[in-house]
Amino acid sequence: MRVPLSQAELASLIGCTREAVEQKLREWRQRGLIATGNRSIRVLRVRELARTARVAMPDFESAQGGHGRSFPHPGAA
């Protein structure tokens, strides 16, 4: 799955800084979950990334004062 977004665009969509996005993407690249380049993010291991993101969201929600955005589970209708 390829997502055509820059880090700045992704940060704007989810309501956080580009630096926070960069840090998380770097971590996920090192774990082999994603590949990045040319203003895009390619998800290599969808299920593991979804599981990781669900665990991380409570931290994101509290850091955003309860105003973080929620996205549907992959494969949800």
Image (tube, rainbow, N blue to C red):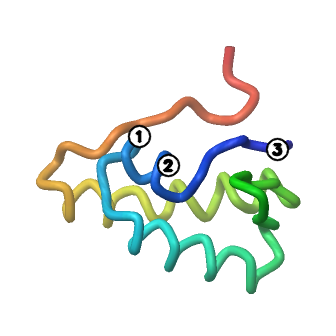
- Count neighbours of disc 2 (C-alpha within 10 A) and say few if under 14, some if 14 to 19, many if 20 or more: some
> Cα distance, mark 2 to mark 1?
5 Å
Camera-nearest residue between 75 and 43: 43
Q: Which residue is identified by label 2?
A: 10
* SS assignment at label 3: strand
Amino acid type of the residue tagged 3 in the rendering: Arg
> Cα distance, mark 3 to mark 2?
13 Å
The x, y position of residue 18, in whole percent, is 40, 65
Which numbered dot is residue 13?
A: 1
Q: Is residue 31 above or below residue 71?
A: below
Single out the residue that lies furthest toward the top: 77
Which numbered dot is residue 52?
A: none
- Count neighbours of disc 1 (C-alpha within 10 A) and say few if under 14, some if 14 to 19, many if 20 or more: few
Q: Which residue is identified by label 3?
A: 2
Please state, as top left, top right, bottom left or bottom right, where the N terminus lies in the image.
top right
Q: Is residue 50 above or below residue 34?
A: above
* SS assignment at label 1: helix
Residue in the picture at 78% in, 68% down: 33
Residue in the picture at 40% in, 74% down: 19
Q: What is the quadrant of residue 28 in the picture?
A: bottom right
Dots 3, 2 in contact, CB < 8 A: no
The x, y position of residue 12, in whole percent, is 37, 45
Camera-nearest residue between 42 and 56: 42
Amino acid type of the residue tagged 1 in the rendering: Leu
Single out the residue that lies furthest toward the bottom: 30
* SS assignment at label 2: helix
Q: Please tell me which of labels 1 and 3 falls first in the chain.
A: 3
The x, y position of residue 72, in whole percent, is 55, 30
